Protein backbone atom coordinates (compact mmCIF):
# COMPACT_ATOMS: atom_id res chain seq x y z
CA UNK A 1 0.00 0.00 0.00
CA UNK A 2 1.32 3.44 -0.92
CA UNK A 3 2.25 5.69 1.96
CA UNK A 4 0.30 8.87 2.69
CA UNK A 5 2.45 11.77 1.48
CA UNK A 6 2.32 14.73 3.88
CA UNK A 7 3.59 18.30 3.50
CA UNK A 8 4.04 20.27 6.75
CA UNK A 9 3.60 24.06 6.57
CA UNK A 10 4.45 26.02 9.71
CA UNK A 11 6.64 29.04 10.42
CA UNK A 12 8.00 27.45 13.62
CA UNK A 13 11.03 25.24 13.01
CA UNK A 14 10.36 23.42 16.29
CA UNK A 15 6.76 22.62 15.31
CA UNK A 16 7.88 21.43 11.87
CA UNK A 17 10.50 19.17 13.41
CA UNK A 18 8.13 17.78 16.07
CA UNK A 19 5.37 17.10 13.54
CA UNK A 20 7.83 15.42 11.20
CA UNK A 21 9.05 13.17 14.04
CA UNK A 22 5.49 12.26 15.05
CA UNK A 23 4.24 11.57 11.53
CA UNK A 24 7.37 9.69 10.43
CA UNK A 25 6.86 7.29 13.35
CA UNK A 26 3.86 5.82 11.51
CA UNK A 27 4.81 3.42 8.74
CA UNK A 28 1.73 4.41 6.71
CA UNK A 29 2.86 8.05 6.50
CA UNK A 30 5.72 9.71 4.61
CA UNK A 31 6.65 13.34 5.21
CA UNK A 32 7.67 14.57 1.75
CA UNK A 33 8.69 18.02 2.91
CA UNK A 34 8.30 20.95 5.26
CA UNK A 35 7.84 24.65 4.52
CA UNK A 36 8.05 27.81 6.61
CA UNK A 37 5.35 29.61 4.61
CA UNK A 38 2.85 29.05 1.76
CA UNK A 39 5.16 30.43 -0.95
CA UNK A 40 7.82 27.82 -0.17
CA UNK A 41 5.09 25.19 0.10
CA UNK A 42 3.67 26.09 -3.33
CA UNK A 43 7.06 25.49 -4.97
CA UNK A 44 7.42 22.12 -3.26
CA UNK A 45 3.89 21.14 -4.32
CA UNK A 46 4.90 21.71 -7.96
CA UNK A 47 7.62 19.08 -7.55
CA UNK A 48 5.53 16.45 -5.75
CA UNK A 49 1.83 16.53 -4.89
CA UNK A 50 1.02 15.74 -1.25
CA UNK A 51 -1.95 13.63 -0.20
CA UNK A 52 -2.42 15.72 2.95
CA UNK A 53 -1.20 19.15 4.07
CA UNK A 54 -0.82 20.24 7.69
CA UNK A 55 -1.25 24.00 7.75
CA UNK A 56 -0.52 26.67 10.34
CA UNK A 57 -2.84 29.69 10.56
CA UNK A 58 -0.42 32.49 11.47
CA UNK A 59 2.53 32.71 9.07
CA UNK A 60 4.61 35.43 7.41
CA UNK A 61 3.94 36.64 3.84
CA UNK A 62 0.61 34.73 3.57
CA UNK A 63 -1.69 33.51 6.34
CA UNK A 64 -2.99 29.95 6.38
CA UNK A 65 -6.63 30.90 5.73
CA UNK A 66 -5.73 32.71 2.50
CA UNK A 67 -3.60 29.78 1.34
CA UNK A 68 -6.39 27.34 2.22
CA UNK A 69 -8.87 29.29 0.11
CA UNK A 70 -6.47 29.27 -2.83
CA UNK A 71 -5.98 25.50 -2.54
CA UNK A 72 -9.69 24.74 -2.26
CA UNK A 73 -10.67 26.97 -5.16
CA UNK A 74 -7.97 25.63 -7.52
CA UNK A 75 -6.99 22.06 -6.63
CA UNK A 76 -8.60 20.73 -3.43
CA UNK A 77 -6.30 18.68 -1.21
CA UNK A 78 -7.17 17.38 2.30
CA UNK A 79 -5.91 20.01 4.74
CA UNK A 80 -5.40 19.55 8.48
CA UNK A 81 -5.19 22.82 10.40
CA UNK A 82 -2.44 22.91 13.03
CA UNK A 83 -3.44 25.58 15.53
CA UNK A 84 -2.58 26.94 18.95
CA UNK A 85 -5.06 27.16 21.81
CA UNK A 86 -5.54 30.95 21.76
CA UNK A 87 -9.25 31.87 21.84
CA UNK A 88 -9.02 34.21 18.86
CA UNK A 89 -7.15 31.56 16.86
CA UNK A 90 -9.75 28.94 17.82
CA UNK A 91 -12.42 31.06 16.14
CA UNK A 92 -10.24 31.52 13.05
CA UNK A 93 -9.54 27.79 12.97
CA UNK A 94 -13.26 27.02 12.95
CA UNK A 95 -13.58 29.40 10.00
CA UNK A 96 -10.99 27.26 8.21
CA UNK A 97 -13.30 24.25 8.55
CA UNK A 98 -16.00 26.20 6.70
CA UNK A 99 -13.49 26.89 3.92
CA UNK A 100 -12.79 23.18 3.41
CA UNK A 101 -10.21 22.04 5.98
CA UNK A 102 -11.15 18.55 7.14
CA UNK A 103 -9.58 18.36 10.60
CA UNK A 104 -7.86 20.27 13.41
CA UNK A 105 -4.82 19.27 15.42
CA UNK A 106 -3.39 21.10 18.39
CA UNK A 107 0.19 22.27 17.91
CA UNK A 108 2.41 19.63 19.51
CA UNK A 109 4.26 20.69 22.63
CA UNK A 110 6.62 19.23 25.18
CA UNK A 111 5.04 17.05 27.85
CA UNK A 112 5.24 13.73 29.61
CA UNK A 113 6.01 10.51 27.78
CA UNK A 114 2.32 9.54 28.01
CA UNK A 115 1.28 12.93 26.61
CA UNK A 116 3.65 12.55 23.65
CA UNK A 117 2.48 8.99 22.96
CA UNK A 118 -1.16 10.10 22.97
CA UNK A 119 -0.27 13.00 20.66
CA UNK A 120 1.34 10.51 18.27
CA UNK A 121 -1.81 8.39 18.20
CA UNK A 122 -4.19 11.32 17.74
CA UNK A 123 -2.15 13.26 15.16
CA UNK A 124 -1.30 10.23 13.01
CA UNK A 125 -4.92 9.04 13.08
CA UNK A 126 -6.16 12.50 12.07
CA UNK A 127 -3.76 12.64 9.11
CA UNK A 128 -4.88 9.17 8.00
CA UNK A 129 -8.52 10.22 8.33
CA UNK A 130 -7.82 13.32 6.24
CA UNK A 131 -6.21 11.19 3.52
CA UNK A 132 -9.47 9.22 3.25
CA UNK A 133 -11.60 12.36 2.99
CA UNK A 134 -12.97 13.87 -0.20
CA UNK A 135 -12.26 17.63 0.08
CA UNK A 136 -14.75 20.11 -1.28
CA UNK A 137 -13.82 22.68 -3.94
CA UNK A 138 -14.65 26.64 -2.86
CA UNK A 139 8.23 4.96 8.64
CA UNK A 140 10.14 3.41 11.22
CA UNK A 141 7.68 0.85 12.57
CA UNK A 142 6.43 1.42 16.08
CA UNK A 143 4.18 -0.94 18.02
CA UNK A 144 0.51 -0.11 17.53
CA UNK A 145 -0.96 1.28 20.73
CA UNK A 146 -3.55 -0.91 22.39
CA UNK A 147 -7.03 0.20 21.35
CA UNK A 148 -9.10 0.42 24.52
CA UNK A 149 -12.85 -0.06 24.58
CA UNK A 150 -15.45 1.77 26.67
CA UNK A 151 -14.76 -0.79 29.44
CA UNK A 152 -11.86 1.48 30.41
CA UNK A 153 -14.32 4.19 31.50
CA UNK A 154 -17.68 2.49 32.10
CA UNK A 155 -18.60 -1.18 32.43
CA UNK A 156 -21.24 -2.86 30.27
CA UNK A 157 -24.90 -2.14 31.13
CA UNK A 158 -26.25 -4.72 33.57
CA UNK A 159 -29.69 -4.69 31.99
CA UNK A 160 -31.19 -3.83 28.65
CA UNK A 161 -34.57 -2.95 30.14
CA UNK A 162 -35.37 0.74 30.62
CA UNK A 163 -38.74 2.27 31.50
CA UNK A 164 -39.97 4.63 28.78
CA UNK A 165 -40.52 8.24 29.81
CA UNK A 166 -42.10 11.17 28.03
CA UNK A 167 -38.70 12.77 27.45
CA UNK A 168 -36.30 11.52 24.82
CA UNK A 169 -32.57 12.25 24.76
CA UNK A 170 -30.53 12.45 21.56
CA UNK A 171 -26.93 11.15 21.63
CA UNK A 172 -24.72 12.14 18.68
CA UNK A 173 -21.21 11.07 17.68
CA UNK A 174 -19.06 12.53 14.89
CA UNK A 175 -15.44 12.92 13.79
CA UNK A 176 -13.82 13.91 10.47
CA UNK A 177 -16.19 16.30 8.70
CA UNK A 178 -18.43 16.40 11.74
CA UNK A 179 -18.11 20.08 12.57
CA UNK A 180 -19.97 21.12 9.43
CA UNK A 181 -22.33 18.14 9.62
CA UNK A 182 -23.30 19.11 13.16
CA UNK A 183 -23.85 22.71 12.11
CA UNK A 184 -26.23 21.59 9.36
CA UNK A 185 -28.03 19.21 11.71
CA UNK A 186 -28.41 21.63 14.63
CA UNK A 187 -29.30 24.72 12.59
CA UNK A 188 -32.62 23.30 11.42
CA UNK A 189 -33.84 22.22 14.86
CA UNK A 190 -36.72 24.12 16.50
CA UNK A 191 -36.22 25.93 19.85
CA UNK A 192 -38.02 23.13 21.75
CA UNK A 193 -35.99 20.25 20.26
CA UNK A 194 -35.19 17.33 22.60
CA UNK A 195 -32.08 17.58 24.74
CA UNK A 196 -28.94 16.59 22.84
CA UNK A 197 -25.53 15.34 24.00
CA UNK A 198 -22.68 15.32 21.48
CA UNK A 199 -19.20 13.92 21.14
CA UNK A 200 -17.24 15.52 18.29
CA UNK A 201 -13.57 14.58 18.09
CA UNK A 202 -11.76 17.90 18.58
CA UNK A 203 -8.66 19.04 20.46
CA UNK A 204 -8.88 20.52 23.94
CA UNK A 205 -10.27 24.10 24.14
CA UNK A 206 -11.50 24.17 20.54
CA UNK A 207 -14.85 22.73 21.60
CA UNK A 208 -15.61 25.86 23.61
CA UNK A 209 -15.15 28.09 20.55
CA UNK A 210 -17.06 25.57 18.41
CA UNK A 211 -19.99 25.57 20.85
CA UNK A 212 -20.10 29.38 20.93
CA UNK A 213 -20.13 29.50 17.14
CA UNK A 214 -23.03 27.06 16.92
CA UNK A 215 -24.90 28.83 19.71
CA UNK A 216 -24.92 31.98 17.58
CA UNK A 217 -26.19 30.11 14.51
CA UNK A 218 -28.89 27.88 15.97
CA UNK A 219 -32.37 28.35 17.43
CA UNK A 220 -31.44 25.97 20.23
CA UNK A 221 -28.81 26.77 22.86
CA UNK A 222 -25.43 25.11 22.34
CA UNK A 223 -22.71 24.98 25.00
CA UNK A 224 -19.60 23.07 25.95
CA UNK A 225 -20.69 20.58 28.59
CA UNK A 226 -19.71 21.06 32.23
CA UNK A 227 -19.86 18.32 34.84
CA UNK A 228 -23.41 17.85 36.21
CA UNK A 229 -25.11 19.94 33.49
CA UNK A 230 -28.80 18.98 33.15
CA UNK A 231 -29.89 17.77 29.72
CA UNK A 232 -32.67 20.16 28.74
CA UNK A 233 -35.07 20.66 25.86
CA UNK A 234 -33.78 23.25 23.43
CA UNK A 235 -30.14 22.67 24.36
CA UNK A 236 -27.18 20.73 23.00
CA UNK A 237 -24.19 19.86 25.20
CA UNK A 238 -20.87 19.21 23.46
CA UNK A 239 -18.14 17.16 25.13
CA UNK A 240 -15.06 19.21 26.04
CA UNK A 241 -11.98 18.25 24.03
CA UNK A 242 -9.77 15.82 25.98
CA UNK A 243 -12.57 14.71 28.37
CA UNK A 244 -15.07 11.88 28.10
CA UNK A 245 -18.78 12.74 28.30
CA UNK A 246 -21.27 10.37 29.94
CA UNK A 247 -25.05 10.61 30.10
CA UNK A 248 -26.43 9.90 33.58
CA UNK A 249 -29.88 9.81 35.15
CA UNK A 250 -31.20 10.66 38.61
CA UNK A 251 -34.93 10.08 38.89
CA UNK A 252 -36.52 11.92 35.96
CA UNK A 253 -33.46 14.15 35.48
CA UNK A 254 -30.88 13.44 32.82
CA UNK A 255 -27.49 15.05 33.33
CA UNK A 256 -23.93 14.65 32.10
CA UNK A 257 -20.67 13.67 33.72
CA UNK A 258 -17.41 15.06 32.35
CA UNK A 259 -14.69 12.56 33.12
CA UNK A 260 -10.98 12.03 32.62
CA UNK A 261 -9.70 8.67 31.48
CA UNK A 262 -7.60 6.88 28.88
CA UNK A 263 -8.08 7.10 25.13
CA UNK A 264 -11.02 4.87 24.18
CA UNK A 265 -11.18 3.64 20.57
CA UNK A 266 -8.11 5.90 20.23
CA UNK A 267 -10.11 9.00 21.22
CA UNK A 268 -10.89 11.23 24.18
CA UNK A 269 -13.74 12.13 24.16
CA UNK A 270 -14.99 8.83 22.80
CA UNK A 271 -18.34 8.25 21.13
CA UNK A 272 -18.35 4.68 22.49
CA UNK A 273 -18.22 6.02 26.05
CA UNK A 274 -21.15 8.38 25.48
CA UNK A 275 -23.22 5.73 23.70
CA UNK A 276 -22.57 3.09 26.38
CA UNK A 277 -23.66 5.49 29.11
CA UNK A 278 -26.77 6.30 27.08
CA UNK A 279 -27.54 2.59 26.78
CA UNK A 280 -27.16 2.13 30.53
CA UNK A 281 -29.00 5.16 31.84
CA UNK A 282 -31.54 6.00 29.12
CA UNK A 283 -32.07 2.84 27.05
CA UNK A 284 -35.24 3.08 24.96
CA UNK A 285 -35.51 6.81 25.70
CA UNK A 286 -32.54 7.52 23.41
CA UNK A 287 -32.29 8.36 19.74
CA UNK A 288 -28.71 7.73 18.66
CA UNK A 289 -27.05 9.40 15.68
CA UNK A 290 -23.66 8.55 14.20
CA UNK A 291 -22.17 10.88 11.62
CA UNK A 292 -19.19 11.21 9.31
CA UNK A 293 -15.84 10.11 10.70
CA UNK A 294 -12.85 7.84 10.29
CA UNK A 295 -12.50 4.61 12.25
CA UNK A 296 -15.02 2.73 14.35
CA UNK A 297 -15.54 4.83 17.47
CA UNK A 298 -19.21 4.62 18.39
CA UNK A 299 -20.01 1.41 16.50
CA UNK A 300 -20.00 -0.88 19.55
CA UNK A 301 -21.73 1.72 21.70
CA UNK A 302 -24.47 2.17 19.11
CA UNK A 303 -25.11 -1.58 19.09
CA UNK A 304 -25.37 -1.48 22.90
CA UNK A 305 -27.92 1.35 22.63
CA UNK A 306 -29.99 -0.61 20.11
CA UNK A 307 -29.92 -3.69 22.35
CA UNK A 308 -31.18 -1.44 25.17
CA UNK A 309 -34.11 -0.29 23.03
CA UNK A 310 -32.80 2.91 21.42
CA UNK A 311 -33.62 4.00 17.87
CA UNK A 312 -30.42 4.68 15.90
CA UNK A 313 -29.69 6.67 12.74
CA UNK A 314 -26.52 6.61 10.62
CA UNK A 315 -25.47 9.23 8.08
CA UNK A 316 -25.30 7.76 4.58
CA UNK A 317 -22.11 7.36 2.55
CA UNK A 318 -22.95 9.98 -0.09
CA UNK A 319 -23.24 12.82 2.44
CA UNK A 320 -20.25 11.78 4.62
CA UNK A 321 -16.81 13.32 4.30
CA UNK A 322 -15.50 9.95 5.53
CA UNK A 323 -17.87 6.95 5.68
CA UNK A 324 -15.99 5.16 8.45
CA UNK A 325 -17.86 5.38 11.75
CA UNK A 326 -21.34 5.03 10.22
CA UNK A 327 -20.19 2.11 8.06
CA UNK A 328 -18.84 0.23 11.09
CA UNK A 329 -22.00 0.85 13.10
CA UNK A 330 -24.12 -0.42 10.20
CA UNK A 331 -21.86 -3.46 9.81
CA UNK A 332 -22.34 -4.39 13.49
CA UNK A 333 -26.11 -4.17 13.15
CA UNK A 334 -26.61 -1.23 15.51
CA UNK A 335 -28.42 1.05 13.04
CA UNK A 336 -32.16 1.28 12.39
CA UNK A 337 -32.09 3.85 9.57
CA UNK A 338 -29.47 5.16 7.13
CA UNK A 339 -30.19 8.69 5.91
CA UNK A 340 -28.56 11.59 4.08
CA UNK A 341 -27.44 14.34 6.44
CA UNK A 342 -30.25 16.70 5.34
CA UNK A 343 -32.93 14.22 6.50
CA UNK A 344 -31.50 13.21 9.88
CA UNK A 345 -32.97 16.10 11.91
CA UNK A 346 -36.49 15.49 10.62
CA UNK A 347 -36.32 11.76 11.31
CA UNK A 348 -34.95 12.39 14.80
CA UNK A 349 -37.80 14.81 15.61
CA UNK A 350 -40.41 12.35 14.33
CA UNK A 351 -38.97 9.54 16.40
CA UNK A 352 -38.77 11.69 19.54
CA UNK A 353 -42.41 12.79 19.15
CA UNK A 354 -43.79 9.24 19.18
CA UNK A 355 -44.07 9.00 22.96
CA UNK A 356 -45.12 12.61 23.56
Image (cartoon, rainbow, N blue to C red):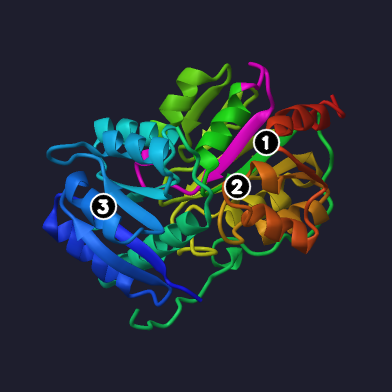
Which residue is at 35% across, 79% downward? 139
Residue 12 placed where, x, y %? 14, 53
Q: Position of residue 313 (x, y in %)?
A: 75, 43
**Disc marking residue 292:** 2
What distance separates the C-alpha of mark 3 from that of mark 1?
31 Å
Left or right, 218 with reference to 226 = right
Q: Earlier in the sequence, mark 2 or mark 1?
A: 2
Instruction: Give the magenta range.
Output: 188-207
Q: Are discs 2 and 1 less than 8 Å apart at CB?
A: yes
Residue at 47% x, 63% y is 263
Residue at far front of view: 46
Q: Is residue 167 visible?
A: no
Q: Secondary structure at mark 3?
A: loop
The residue that mark 3 highlights is: 107
Quarter of the image where the C terminus is located: top right
Which picture quadrant has residue 57?
top left
Instruction: Write down the residue under mark 1.
Output: 341
Q: Position of residue 219 (x, y in %)?
A: 57, 16
Residue at 45%, 45% (x, y): give it. Answer: 102
Q: Crowdedness of circle 2 by 10 Å Cα count: few (<14), some, many (20+)?
A: many
Helix, strand or loop under label 1: helix
Please say whether residue 195 is one of the residues in the magenta stretch. Answer: yes
> At numbered mark 2, what does the secondary structure look like: helix, strand or loop?
loop
Q: Earlier in the sequence, mark 3 or mark 2?
A: 3
Amino acid sequence: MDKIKVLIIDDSAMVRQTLETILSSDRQIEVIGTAADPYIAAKKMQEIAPDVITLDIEMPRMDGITFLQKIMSQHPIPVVICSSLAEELSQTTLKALEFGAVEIIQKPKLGTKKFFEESQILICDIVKAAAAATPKRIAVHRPIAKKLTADAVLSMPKTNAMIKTTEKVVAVGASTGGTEALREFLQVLPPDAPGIVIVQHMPENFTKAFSKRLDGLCQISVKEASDNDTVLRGQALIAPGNDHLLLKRSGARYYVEVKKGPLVSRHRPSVDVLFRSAARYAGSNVVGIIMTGMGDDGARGMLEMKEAGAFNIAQDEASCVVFGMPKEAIKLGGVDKILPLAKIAGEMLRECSKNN
